[in-house]
Each structure stands twice: as C-alpha cells, then as structure tokens.
Image: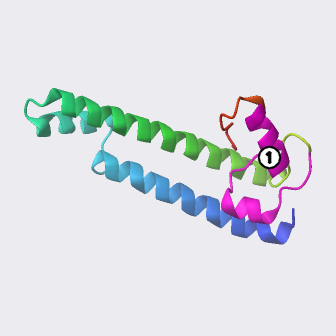
Amino acid sequence: MNPASLPDFVAQLNAQREGLLAQVRQQRGGDIGRADAAANAREGTEGDWASADAQHDLAVALEERELAELNAIGAALQRVADGSYGTCSDCGADIPPARLHAAPTALRCIGCQSQAETAHGGVHAPTM
C-alpha cells in the first residue's frame, strides 16, 4: 500500500461513515432513539398494526445493515492506524487500490474473497 494514498482512503471511509450516520438519523426522524422512532411510527398508522410491524421490521433490518457497515468502516480505519490497511487478511498480498476505492472496507484481495465466497457455498462472505 502506497502511504501517500492513505489520506484519500481515510477521507472516503469518513465520508461513507458520515453518510450512513445521516441515513440513520433520517430514518429515525432526527436525533431520537430507536424506541422513540418505533413509537412515533406506530402512532402514525392508527390501527394498521400489520403495516406498522412491516415498516418497523424493515427499519430494523436497514439499521442492522448500516450498523454492520459502520463497524466495517471502524475496522478499516483501525487497520489504517495499525498499518495493515490494504493488505489481504488471508494471503498478505497488497489489495489493489482499484478494489479499495470500490470497496474501502475490503479485508481480502479478489482471489481470496472469491475463495471465501466459494467456501461458504456461494454466499457472500463479509469483506470487512
């Protein structure tokens, strides 16, 4: 990994994190907690509990996905700090900059990521 390119990746990771945090705030209706957002959603449905439950389930699933992405970003920033960012966690090879620009939280090079996905029956293993 070229140390001169690290600031670009850090900026990309930070922008991604800020975007996710803004999405979470928007989904919640501002800076309120999950419980308050759920209560507000239920109040707005006036008896349509099935619709409210479906909306709540979707919101929770989205928030869990965003939390996983935030954790992956935090882990990537930690790898920047400890000097291991851009190094494949499986084989130790450099992860190409093009892959890191496309997936800045990537843990593996393309070859190792493909092997990990094949080993898991075609299910996409996390790139975090």
Q: As drawn, is 121 to the left or to the right of 35?
A: right
Compared with 93, 63 (above or below) is: above
Q: Where is residue 99 in the image (x, y as percent from the top left)?
A: 75, 60
Q: As drawn, is 125 to the left or to the right of 3?
A: left
Query: From the image, which quarter does the N terminus lie in?
Result: bottom right
Please report the residue visible at 81 percent of the width from the left and 38 percent of the height from the top.
115
Please report the residue visible at 49 percent of the width from the left and 44 percent of the height from the top.
66
Q: Where is residue 109 in the image (x, y as percent from the top left)?
A: 82, 50
Q: Where is residue 24 in the image (x, y as percent from the top left)?
A: 40, 48
> Is residue 105 a member of the stretch shown in magenta?
yes
The kind of residue tagged 1 is Arg
Q: As drawn, is 96 to the left or to the right of 93?
A: left
Please report the residue visible at 56 percent of the width from the left and 40 percent of the height from the top.
68
Report the span colored magenta. 92-118
Residue 3: quarter of image: bottom right
Which residue in the structure is indicated by mark 1? 108
Compared with 1, 42 (above or below) is: above
Q: Position of residue 19 (x, y in %)?
A: 48, 59
Residue 89: quarter of image: top right
